[in-house]
């Protein structure tokens, strides 16, 4: 029983790590676009004034 619970815990940790990696990958892949658009807005706002 202890072995089973240990395996289950390892499995849960593995799944959680994968989910975190996936979220990080999504964030990294989407952050350049966010940075680019925000920097564009920031650089263009002073000229409009």
Image (cartoon, grey):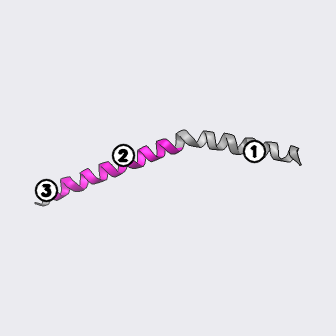
Q: Is residue 11 magenta?
A: yes
Residue 3 to residue 40: above or below:
below
Residue at left offset 65%, top offset 43%: 35
Q: Are marks 1 and 3 in contact (CB under 8 Å)?
A: no
Image spot of residue 26 (x, y percent): 49, 42
User: Which image quadrant for residue 4?
Assistant: bottom left
User: Which circle, 2 or 3, is nearer the viewer?
Assistant: 2
Q: CA distance from mark 2 to mark 3?
A: 23 Å
Query: Of 5 and 43, which appears nearest the observer?
Result: 43
Residue at left offset 52%, top offset 45%: 27
Please report whichever mark, 1 or 2, sits nearer to the chain's N-terminal start: 2
Q: Which residues are magenta?
A: 4-27
Image spot of residue 42 (x, y percent): 77, 46
Q: Is residue 37 magenta?
A: no
Q: Which mark is residue 18?
A: 2
User: Which circle, 1 or 3, is nearer the viewer?
Assistant: 1
Residue 2 to residue 28: above or below:
below
Q: Which mark is residue 3?
A: 3
- Residue placed furthest toward the bottom: 2
User: Which circle, 1 or 2, is nearer the viewer?
Assistant: 1
Q: Is residue 15 left or right of residue 48?
A: left
């Amino acid at each position: 029983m202890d072995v089973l619970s240990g395996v289950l815990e390892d499995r849960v940790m593995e799944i959680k790590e994968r989910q975190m990696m996936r979220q990080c990958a999504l964030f990294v892949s989407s952050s350049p676009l966010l940075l680019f658009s925000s920097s564009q807005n920031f650089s263009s706002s002073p000229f409009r004034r």
